[in-house]
Image: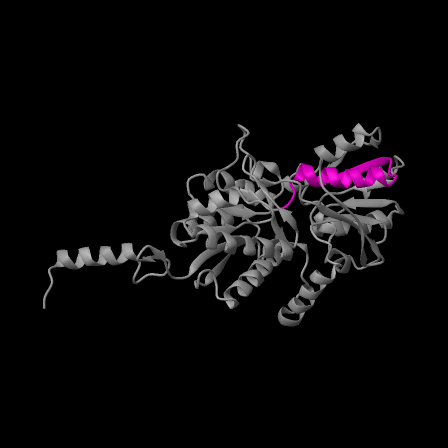
Amino acid sequence: MKFSRGFVFVLLCAVLVTGTLFAGGQQGGKETGDIQVGCLQDITGPTSSLGQMVDEGAKWAIAEINAAGGVNGRKINVTTYDTRGDVNEAINAFTRMVTSGNVSAIIGPPVANIAMAIAPISERYNVPILGFAIDTKCQIKEDGTPYKNMFLFQPNADQQAEIMASYAIKNGFKRFGILYNQANAYSVSLLPAFVNRIQAEGQVVVEPIAYNPQDRDFKTLLGKITSQNVDAIYAPVYVQELILIVQQARAIGFRGALINGLDACPPFNTLLGEPCDNIYFINNVDDTESKLQDMIGKVKAEKGIDATNKFFLGYDVGKILAKIFGDVGTDPAKVAEAVANISNFSGLTGNISIDPATHMPRGLEMVMFNYNNITPVFLERYAAK
């Protein structure tokens, strides 16, 4: 039997629409085929220690889902795109994902500079990005409304800074120096709320000192800070710079406290190469809990890696996406709507609810730690007001 070219063309179009030959289609109104998720992370660049952990955590969660039968019998595939810590590379990777990757959602980066570059471009598409970049400009436009596809899954910079300041005040620190990277959105974003909270309680913040991203010798800047008799230095910077700052602060004789953001979490304690006493930091999880210790042990045995806080952030988002796919399907616009209305999801990083007006979490607790030599010591749980 012979068919005309026109008939063959119509037949192929029908096949494409019904999805009988292609993964992710529909049969009889039911979605079929594998579910595609993109993971946009720095895997080989300067913040690779962060991106690799998010990637590993998300894939661990998805592997658990798939091993249990997937989502309504459908397997989830996670494809990782390496940003290499470069904004242009990230934009190109994002564009490939949303135009040809057939993704229903994207697990986004924890790096503010990259998320801020992607945010305006993301408005052109209908694919939600579930990320971890805490600068509020990654989620909120200048007019105060949220980018439709940008979501945050840890407390934002203002909330994290307020938590760190609240702990410092409560525990007797009175005079603070500040050292920050003036070209890094993450570092800059953690300043205002910290300073405002300290000053509102009548404590002293000496003039914050900025440095450039290429700087590696901080002794002169640290000397200016320590000469003003501070009892704590606030340094919300990435881990490579933080290691140098701590080492050089100790080298010039400063024995006071250093208060840091998430980058002082493990593996900072093993990377520093010396005792970490009197270093305070914020964390998304209490990884001394037995439940998390069990998972850390399993990950170490199977993957040979030490699961850190970013692993658990990625894990929670992987679980959240699986639940949403089961609830509303895999149409990206429906997924985005469901993400904006997440309520009381019980994750390893806490009880997660997303505010649809900001696309950021409400009331999510964080944990303050310090170190005994190189061992993390749980202090207190806090939620920003």
Residue at 82% from the left image edge and 30% from the top image edge: 201
Name the spot of residue 73 as percent of width and height, x first: 44, 64
Picture quadrant of residue 256 = top right
Give the quarter of the figure containing the C terminus: top right
Give the quarter of the figure containing the N terminus: bottom left
Residue 45 seen in this snapshot: no
Picture quadrant of residue 254 = top right
Colour scheme of the picture: one colour
Q: Which residues are magenta?
A: 154-181
Towards the viewer: 8 or 318 = 318
Q: How many marks?
A: 0
Residue at 42% from the left image edge and 40% from the top image edge: 124
Residue at 57% from the left image edge and 49% from the top image edge: 109
Name the spot of residue 230 as percent of width and height, x first: 87, 37
Q: Is residue 173 magenta?
A: yes
Name the spot of residue 290 as percent of width and height, x first: 73, 62
Name the spot of residue 351 as percent of width and height, x first: 64, 48
Does 199 sit left or right of 191 as displayed? Answer: right
Give the answer, above or below, for where 141 lies relative to 63: above
Residue 171 seen in this snapshot: yes
Q: Is residue 99 magenta?
A: no
Give the answer, above or below, for where 197 lies relative to 329: above
Does 247 sit left or right of 365 as displayed? Answer: right
Does 187 sit left or right of 201 as displayed? Answer: left
